Amino acid sequence: MNRRVTGWIFVALQGVLLGALILLPGRDDWATPSWLRSAGGGFILGGLALIAIAALRLGPALTPTPVPTSRGVLTTTGFYRYVRHPIYTGVLAIVAGLTVRSGSFVHLAVAAITVVFFTVKARWEEARLAERYPDYAAYAAITPRFVPRPRRRSPVG
């Protein structure tokens, strides 16, 4: 299948999953005290901010699909220093926020499917990035996909 078509299929499926999380009604499967609703709101706002900043950092390399553009360069600074897919990290933060606020096991199931979906999408995109950028494999070897981890300090001496 054509890469562009596959890319747009990923975008469509992503829209369906995120739409479900937004449109499905909340439930009372678990308690959602005000602190949990506030934490969920913080994740949503933080995710939106992360998406905006990471998207701006990409500049001309930003595309609506996971197919790299010929105009871009490999970005490894800013949030890209800590994770390979900060935009996806932002989306997953929004998913987490929506889910904890929902009080719904249905939302939790859709959130789990969404995490698996983004893992598959990122792996597919990374194969394209490795073809496009010769340094991508080295970058991927030291930079986590979605969740930052503490950087190891090199020994002094």
Image: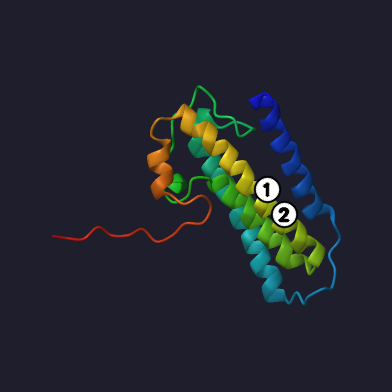
Residue at the far left in the pictured view: 157
The part of the image, by quadrant, that contains residue 46 is bottom right
Question: Helix, strand, or loop for circle 1?
Answer: helix
Which one is in front, 89 or 143?
143
Q: Which residue bears the numbered disc 1?
A: 117
User: Left or right: 135 with respect to 101?
Assistant: left
- The image shows residue 14 at horizontal and vertical percentages of 72, 43
The residues tagged by marks 2 and 1 sit, at their Cα atoms, a distance apart of 6 Å
Question: What colouring style does the render use?
Answer: rainbow
Number of callouts in the render?
A: 2
Compared to 74, does 39 lie above or below? Answer: below
- The answer to whether residue 76 is seen in the rendering is no
Does the CB distance between marks 2 and 1 fall below 8 Å? yes
Which one is in front, 103 or 109?
109
What residue lies at 66% left-to-right and 52% top-to-bottom? 116
Compared to 146, does 42 lie above or below? Answer: below
The part of the image, by quadrant, that contains residue 121 is top right
Residue flagged by tag 2: what amino acid is it? Ile
Q: Which residue bears the numbered disc 2?
A: 113
Residue flagged by tag 1: what amino acid is it? Phe
What residue lies at 47% left-to-right and 33% top-to-bottom? 130
What residue lies at 78% left-to-right and 65% top-to-bottom? 102
What residue lies at 70% left-to-right and 58% top-to-bottom? 112
- The image shows residue 104 at horizontal and vertical percentages of 80, 67
Q: Quadrant of the C terminus?
A: bottom left
User: Left or right: 69 with respect to 3?
Assistant: left
The part of the image, by quadrant, that contains residue 106 is bottom right
Question: Helix, strand, or loop for circle 2?
Answer: helix
Q: Tag 2: Cα neighbours inside 10 Å, few (<14), some, or many (≥20)?
A: few
Residue 147 tag number: none
